[in-house]
Image (tube, grey):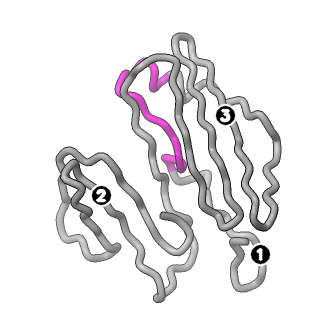
Amino acid sequence: KYQNEKGEAINLISKGNLPYPLEMRFSDPAINTQAFSVPYAADMSEVFIDENGSKTLKLTQQLSDLIVEKKITFYSKGNYDIEVKLSKNINYFISPGYRPSIAVDSYTVHGALVMDDQETIHTYEDGDMDKDENIKNAWMTSAFDRYYA
């Protein structure tokens, strides 16, 4: 589905760019450190989706005092839904990750948006920022381009 002009699959997730999409970070430094050293277990090794179908992948991470469960439902058009469950109530953040390192085209907007607690959307296009921005009480962020939102 995601191919370059030569029909080759595009690497949408680069191992060199951290954080990864849907990577979790925890407010508690001890849990955060442990989460980086304990791998997730997946309930399937491959995900194949029919033209109009969907598949749900379950990822589980067993930490010493916390179980993290991510259920990611992938759809045929490339979008997905995620449900995160923790075995106890702790603060965490989910990263949108870095965008792919591929050629930028002139037909799509590339940048980021932030929604604050007043439901105001702040949009920042790549190359248009001349200073750091600080959005207080942000509750949703998204990096976007041709392949991601």
Front of the two marks 2 and 1: 2
Q: Is residue 19 left or right of residue 122?
A: right
Residue numbers of the magenta segment: 18-33
The answer to which of 131 and 115 lies nearer the viewer is 115
- Whole-angstrom CA distance, mark 1 to mark 3, is 28 Å
- Residue placed at 50% from the left, 48% from the top? 18
Q: Which quarter shows the N terminus?
A: bottom right
* Label whose residue precedes the other's in the sequence (1 or 3): 1
Secondary element at image label 1: loop
Residue at the image position 48 percent from the left and 64 percent from the top: 149
- From the image, tell me which residue sits under label 2: 114
Q: CA distance from mark 2 to mark 3?
A: 27 Å
Q: Position of residue 95 (x, y in %)?
A: 45, 46
| Outermost residue to the front | 52
Q: Are marks 2 and 1 in contact (CB under 8 Å)?
A: no
Q: Residue at x 62, y 25 (%)?
A: 61
* Label 2 residue SS: strand
Amino acid type of the residue that numbered disc 3 sits on in the rendered structure: Leu
Query: In this view of the protein, which residue sits in the foreground, 93 or 77?
Result: 77
In this view, the residue farthest toward the top is 65
Query: Which circle marks residue 59 in the picture?
Result: 3
Q: Which is nearer the N-term, disc 2 or disc 1?
A: 1
Instruction: Give residue 8's mark.
Output: 1
Q: Secondary structure at mark 3?
A: strand
